[in-house]
């Protein structure tokens, strides 16, 4: 009889985490999922997943060490996917984003050490990579590039600041404690949604399709990855013994206007917003390190089709 493999996923009801839980269950793992409230209707989708009998939901909060420790106890590995993602500006960024991201991550690290887990996989972000004004445009951005914390503070990029400082703390802790930590840094994540609530990046695409201008359109270039490819990457770096450090997990770099054009060519009947932006220099983002580990990803057309069809099926779009 095969030995039971038990892992914990923090923030299990989230966009990425839900797909990761689904993948882990399909591979025979027993999964401990942390959520704020196991009986909240927004987590009901988890209980409907195939092999959900192997899923146990734990009521936990990132800032409550004891609740995290109880969820992680007995697990061989942990996937830390929980992180606050605000849709707009926050009145108190330190309290709403920075403290939960940093202190919560430290609590997860300590609980992992206490439980002697084999490996912790952290879901970080290219937000901790890209915001470096000193990185030359003609130099490919790889895992050696870090966002500048001073720049993020001065420009009030609080999510980027929180992600950067939290990831720094993870690497520092790993080095001092010996805890095996691997980090995955995805960009804007899109794809079909499993959870009943609409996540931030999905709202961007929904608004594109409804003809609304969104904050994402202030960027002339988009870095994109499908949520299912992120889940694959997280399991890949967990399973590969040679995986180490951080991994950029980005499938496509596409100009915003070209992305809108691709949407229009595939779904011409939506009232898309105008795209006034001209092509500008942008950083090339490399996922070569992750590809060398064996990561592959689906085409952007496949991701768009699956995503839009999912929105239509869930009646999230008004079709003209």
Image (spheres, grey):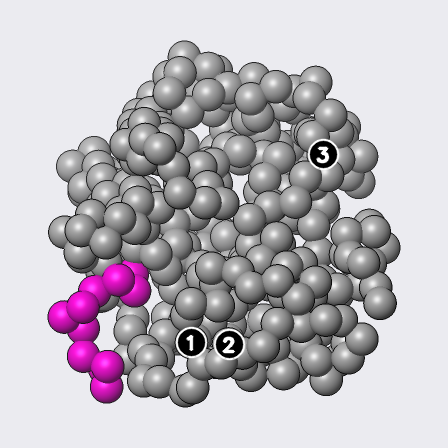
Q: Is residue 140 above or below residue 63?
A: below
- Give the CA separation, mark 2 to mark 3: 33 Å
Residue at coordinates 46% horizontally, 21% vertically from top-left?
61
Q: Please name the residue that numbered disc 2 is placed on.
A: 256
- Looking at the rendering, in which quadrant would you find the C terminus? bottom right
Question: Of marks 1 and 3, which one's residue comes earlier in the chain?
Answer: 3
Residue 56 in sight from this viewpoint? yes
Foreground mark, 2 or 3, reads 2
Towards the viewer: 302 or 111: 302
Say whether residue 238 is left or right of residue 166. Answer: right
Residue at the image point whose x is 75% and y is 64% from the top: 308
Residue 80 in view of the camera: no
Q: Is residue 182 left or right of residue 94?
A: right
Closer to the camera in the image, 115 or 263: 263
Task: Give the left or right position of residue 145, taking residue 92 as reference.
Answer: left
Mark 3 — residue?
46
Q: Magenta stretch containing residue 132, yes or no? A: yes
Q: Quadrant of the N terminus?
A: top right
- Point out residue 275 in the picture as x, y percentages from the top left corner: 54, 78
**Span highlighted in magenta in the image:** 129-139
Are discs 2 and 1 less than 8 Å apart at CB? yes
Q: Is residue 222 magenta?
A: no
Mark 2 packing: few (<14 Cα in 10 Å), some, or many (20+)?
A: many
């Amino acid at each position: 009889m095969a030995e039971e493999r038990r892992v914990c996923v923090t923030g299990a009801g989230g966009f990425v985490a839900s797909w990761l839980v689904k993948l882990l269950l399909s591979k025979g793992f027993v999964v401990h999922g942390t959520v704020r409230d196991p009986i909240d209707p927004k987590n009901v989708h988890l209980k409907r997943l195939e092999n959900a009998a192997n899923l146990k939901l734990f009521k936990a909060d990132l800032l409550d060490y004891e609740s995290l420790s109880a969820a992680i106890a007995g697990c061989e590995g942990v996937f830390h996917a929980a992180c606050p993602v605000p849709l707009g500006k926050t009145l108190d960024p330190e309290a709403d984003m920075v403290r939960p991201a940093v202190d919560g991550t430290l609590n997860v690290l300590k609980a992992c050490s206490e439980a002697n887990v084999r490996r912790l996989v952290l879901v970080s972000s290219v937000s901790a990579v890209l915001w470096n004004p000193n990185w030359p445009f003609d130099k490919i951005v790889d895992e050696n590039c870090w966002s500048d914390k001073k720049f993020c503070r001065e420009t009030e990029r609080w999510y980027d600041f929180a992600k950067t400082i939290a990831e720094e703390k993870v690497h520092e802790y790993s080095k001092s404690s010996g805890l095996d930590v691997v980090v995955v840094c995805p960009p804007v994540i899109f794809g079909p949604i499993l959870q009943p609530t609409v996540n931030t990046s999905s709202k961007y695409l929904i608004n594109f399709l409804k003809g609304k201008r969104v904050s994402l359109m202030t960027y002339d270039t988009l870095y994109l990855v499908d949520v299912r490819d992120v889940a694959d990457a997280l399991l890949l770096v967990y399973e590969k013994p040679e995986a180490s450090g951080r991994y950029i997990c980005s499938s496509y770099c596409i100009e915003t206007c070209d992305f809108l054009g691709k949407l229009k060519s595939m779904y011409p009947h939506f009232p898309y917003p105008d795209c006034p932006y001209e092509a500008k220099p942008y950083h090339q983002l490399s996922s070569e390190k992750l590809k060398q580990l064996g990561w592959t990803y689906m085409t952007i057309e496949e991701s768009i089709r699956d995503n839009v069809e999912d929105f239509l099926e869930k009646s999230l779009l008004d079709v003209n």
